[in-house]
């Protein structure tokens, strides 16, 4: 066991698979561990490199093994998949992780602290509540449309539907259905109250974070996007350039090519979908604001391209600006207009 220099650890809920090699790459150990055995098994080992796929609970185990003195590297699952030989199973996955973690060009995920992971968890709760909110609104609209009650899109139209629903004398809504619709409306009001509390919590936590305070000075960056960027992107340094960071979020064209010819397709949609969605939403809000008319670059795009294409292009630019602010740890400065 003292010869182990590198370990691939395939984590799961209850059963973990270990694949360890020595300095020459020869397999030294292959075994299963129960969840309760992991820390006790790693504790007496000499310091070694431990590779783990960056999936659920990976940051927890990364912190736990670091406390034991090991060097832990989290690998994006897509990067480790290429090293799986033949059938996919736990031993094969652990061997693939062990092989991938030793590659000199491999990219790794920074291990989050407990506070950073808690901040990400708050955003996940908010995202879940937003999905439930949208689902309930659509359900209410659909059920009322079955009886000929249709309203315009947006908050104003939905408020009109709630006013109709609140009218006990409204003859178009059957009595057996009214109670169910009222339950949906009450649930929506409860979710609204919870979202307000979470938003205040995110803003309060962000004010104590230097990265948040730098990001929120950039155009299109509101409290939610700034907080999410600061919490999820804990270490922007591994990206050599701003465009590499934007590519990691999937807001660049997908490339396909052969024989020296390259074709650009739609955006790749790789990386963190939550951050990408927030960036596009922030870009859309910026396009709809008065500031869009004062930006020559944005005005030129809006004159020649569809608004959704412009929103994605602006989201790409915002991601690059965010990377620069996080790297330099400074506020956004508007570039002087060309003479």
Image (spheres, rainbow, N blue to C red):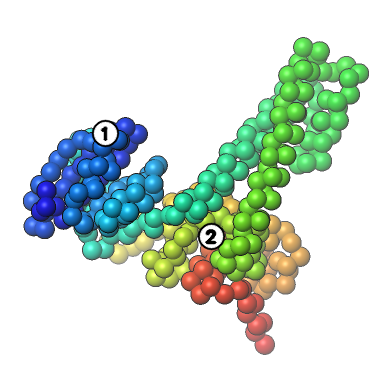
Within the image, what quadrant is residue 17 found in? top left
Disc number placed over residue 244 in the picture, else none: none
Tell me if mark 2 has few (under 14), some (14-19) or many (20+) residues whose alpha carbon lies within 10 angstroms of its own: many
Relative depth, front residue between 142 and 236? 236
Q: Secondary structure at mark 1?
A: strand
Viewer-nearest residue: 9 or 153 = 9
Q: Position of residue 1 (x, y in %)?
A: 11, 48
Q: Residue furthest right?
A: 169
Residue under pointer 1: 34
The local crowd at label 1, few if under 14, some if 14 to 19, many if 20 or more residues have their Cα within 10 Å, is: few
**Number of numbered labels in the structure image:** 2
**Which residue shows up at 84% across the image and 18% down it?**
172
Residue 319 versus residue 110: which sits nearer the camera? 110
**Which residue lies under the disc numbered 2?**
230
Q: Is residue 199 in sight in this rendering?
A: yes
Decide: marks 1, 2 in contact (CB < 8 A)?
Answer: no
What is the CA distance from the residue labelled 1 to the residue labelled 2? 35 Å
Asked whether the viewer can see residue 253, the reply is: no
Residue 53: x, y in percent? 32, 47
Measuring from the top left, give residue 115's x and y in whole percent: 50, 53
At 22% across and 42% down in the image, what residue appears?
41
């Amino acid at each position: 066991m003292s010869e182990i220099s590198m370990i691939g650890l395939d984590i799961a809920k209850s059963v973990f698979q270990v694949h360890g090699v020595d300095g020459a790459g020869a397999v030294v150990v292959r075994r299963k561990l129960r969840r309760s055995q992991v820390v006790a098994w790693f504790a007496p080992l000499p310091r070694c490199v431990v590779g783990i796929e960056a999936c659920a609970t990976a940051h927890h185990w990364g912190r736990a093994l670091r406390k034991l003195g090991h060097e832990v590297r989290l690998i994006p699952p897509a990067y480790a998949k290429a090293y799986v030989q033949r059938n996919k199973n736990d031993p094969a996955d652990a061997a693939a992780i062990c092989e991938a973690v030793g590659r000199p060009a491999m990219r790794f995920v920074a291990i989050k602290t407990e506070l950073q992971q808690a901040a990400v968890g708050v955003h996940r709760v908010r995202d879940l509540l937003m999905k439930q909110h949208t689902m309930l609104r659509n359900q209410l609209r659909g059920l009322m449309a079955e009886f000929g009650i249709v309203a315009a899109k947006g908050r104003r139209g939905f408020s009109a539907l709630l006013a109709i629903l609140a009218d006990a004398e409204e003859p178009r809504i059957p009595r057996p259905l009214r109670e169910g619709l009222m339950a949906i409306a009450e649930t929506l009001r409860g979710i609204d109250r919870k979202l307000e509390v979470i938003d205040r919590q995110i803003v309060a936590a962000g004010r104590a974070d230097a990265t948040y305070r730098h990001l929120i000075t950039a155009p299109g960056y509101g409290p939610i996007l700034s907080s999410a960027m600061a919490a999820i992107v804990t270490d922007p340094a591994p990206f050599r350039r701003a465009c590499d960071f934007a590519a990691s979020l999937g807001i660049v064209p997908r490339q396909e090519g052969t024989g020296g010819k390259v074709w650009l397709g739609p955006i790749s949609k790789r990386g963190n979908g939550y951050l990408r969605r927030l960036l596009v939403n922030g870009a859309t809000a910026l396009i709809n604001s008065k500031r869009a008319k004062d930006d020559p670059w944005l005005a030129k795009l809006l004159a020649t391209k569809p608004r959704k294409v412009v929103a994605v292009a602006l989201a790409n630019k915002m991601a690059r600006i965010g990377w620069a602010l996080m790297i330099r740890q400074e506020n956004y400065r508007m570039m002087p207009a060309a003479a």
